[in-house]
Image: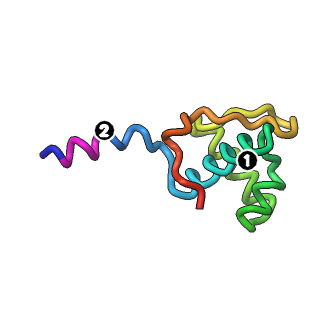
Amino acid sequence: MSQSLGERQAAPHQRFTQLQGQYLAFIYAYSRIFKQPPAEADMRRHFGVTAPTVHQMVLTLEKAGLITRVSGAARSIQLLVPPEALPILT
């Protein structure tokens, strides 16, 4: 019984998929290291995917309320997820 309670408590904190979590962790790590948010090109290089794939993920994260950004403005991504809720970047 306590195990199911623990699972219920953990669920609200993780409102994202494993892949979304990796993008969020990358945004967090990049922002900490370089003192500015990543450009979509930085995410493309890191994840080895196409530009449209990265852009779609950014739109998905924004729609889910996990990030905010200014459309058309470079490096404007801001995390809305606390760092302690992020997975380890792999």
Say if 71 sits above or below 87 in the image: above
Q: Closer to the camera, 62 or 37?
A: 37
Say if 25 sits above or below 36 in the image: below
Quick check: 47 left or right of 10? right
In primary-sequence order, the first of circles 1 and 2 is: 2
Disc 1 target residue: 30
- Marks counted in the figure total 2
> Given the image, on which type of amino acid does mark 1 rest?
Tyr
Q: Secondary structure at mark 2?
A: helix
Disc 2 target residue: 9
- Quarter of the rendering containing residue 89: bottom right
Q: What range of the chain is rendered magenta?
A: 3-8
Residue at 53% across, 45% down: 86
Residue at 69% across, 46% down: 27
Quick check: 79 left or right of 83? right
Mark 2 surroundings: few (<14), some (14-19) or many (≥20) residues within 10 A: few
> Given the image, on which type of amino acid does mark 2 rest?
Gln
